[in-house]
Amino acid sequence: MAIQMVDLRGQYLRLKDEIDAGIARILDTTQFIRGAELDAFESELSGALDGVGTLGVANGTDALQIAFMALGIGPGDEVITPSFTFVATAEAVGLLGATPVFADIDPATFTIDPDAIAPLITERTKAIVPVHLFGQCADLDPILELACSHDLAVIEDTAQAIGARYKGRAAGTMGGFGTLSFFPSKNLGCYGDGGAVLSPIDDWLAQARLISNHGSRKKYHNEVIGVNSRLDAIQAAILRAKLPHLEAFTAARQAAADRYDALLGDMPQISVPTRADYGTHVFHQYTIRVHGNDPAQRDALMDHLKGHGIPSYVYYPVPLHLLPLYKDDADACRLGDMTHTLQAANEVLSLPMHTELTAAEQEQIADAVRAFFAG
Ligand SMILES: Cc1ncc(COP(=O)(O)O)c(C=O)c1O
């Protein structure tokens, strides 16, 4: 079997009976939209995340949009996000007529640098969106303090970090809102699109729930402009089958990360991921740096691995502030210094990481990495 970046099929075959039973249950009841299955999933998800309020929605991008809408973010407002993230983090800000403003990252963790945020705050700033990139939390306490002193909301983009902890607290539960993605390759993935909004504040979650369902609590009595964004019952059933395994999924990823560290950690040409001492890393990605700040060298390693039948991927080659979409937006890109973001985009390479990865496959991957630098 060829080495894969993510092995969805292997995991499915292992859990097939539980997953198939969940899907069959929905086909049997034909309760496809909302209903008891989604209610049950929301409550089980809450149980897994320190009791935070949960709302199942159609995907992680909608989760962000719904959180922004619940906060009333709109034209003239600004939202601070890292530049080194997937575009979805900033996309919904623009959809609502507001402006994302990009901050640099901490080079050790690839997450937003709390010190880069303060200079970007103006009277138009409404929120900060730290992204728990690759499975590790941003350093939240200084961000929460800054937000508190400037009366800003914090929305934790937790698409890549379900199950991670920050000083003992669950990722996604510490800001006013947290958002999850259940995209198939995520640490808890469904079999299509899915996402969730999290909030410890009942009124905020109620507002998000209202917005996610056409702005109506009672059918045909719409109160505000909303969207149609609900987690399908079939996806909820799949996620209910997988959620009890989340801790084991995380442990498998962490064990694989430990093995990679042992195999690659002594190589001077690369660095393995840093694990911040403030929390746990759930390794959505295992992302190395190829030293030298030279994307050609990193891409050459990627090509070499490909030649040996080993997939790898660059998350993300173009920081948001350089995308055609944003590069001419003087407000969004007003922080000139993006040193760490630029270097990360030039150096990062994510190696295969999933719950089914074997030690033998990792040895093969490590041998190929070593051979590249020896050659
Ligand atoms: C950091 C981040 N934010 C948001 C999203 C959006 O999630 P989705 O693909 O479910 O819309 C993703 C996932 O792809 C992501 O990685």
Image (cartoon, grey):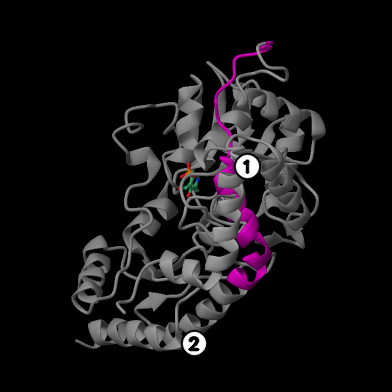
247 up-or-down from 79: above or below: below
| Residue at horizontal 47 percent and vertical 35 percent from the top | 90
Left or right of residue 158, residue 10 in this image: left
Left or right of residue 4, residue 206 in this image: right
- Regarding residue 167, the answer to whether it shows in the image is yes
Q: What amino acid type should be assigned to the residue bearing mark 1?
A: Thr
The span shown in magenta is 221-250
Any magenta on residue 230? yes
**Image quarter of residue 17:** bottom right
Across and down, in percent, residue 214 comes to 60, 20
Q: Determine crowd level at label 1: few under 14, some 14-19, many 20+ residues with C-alpha closer than 10 A.
A: few
Q: Residue 29, labelled with which disc?
A: 1
Q: Quadrant of the N terminus?
A: bottom left
| Residue at horizontal 19 percent and vertical 86 percent from the top | 375
Q: Residue 262, labelled with which disc?
A: 2
- Regarding residue 130, the answer to whether it shows in the image is no
Across and down, in percent, residue 132 comes to 57, 53
- What separation in Å lies between label 2 and label 1 (alpha carbons)? 49 Å
| Residue at horizontal 75 percent and vertical 62 percent from the top | 167
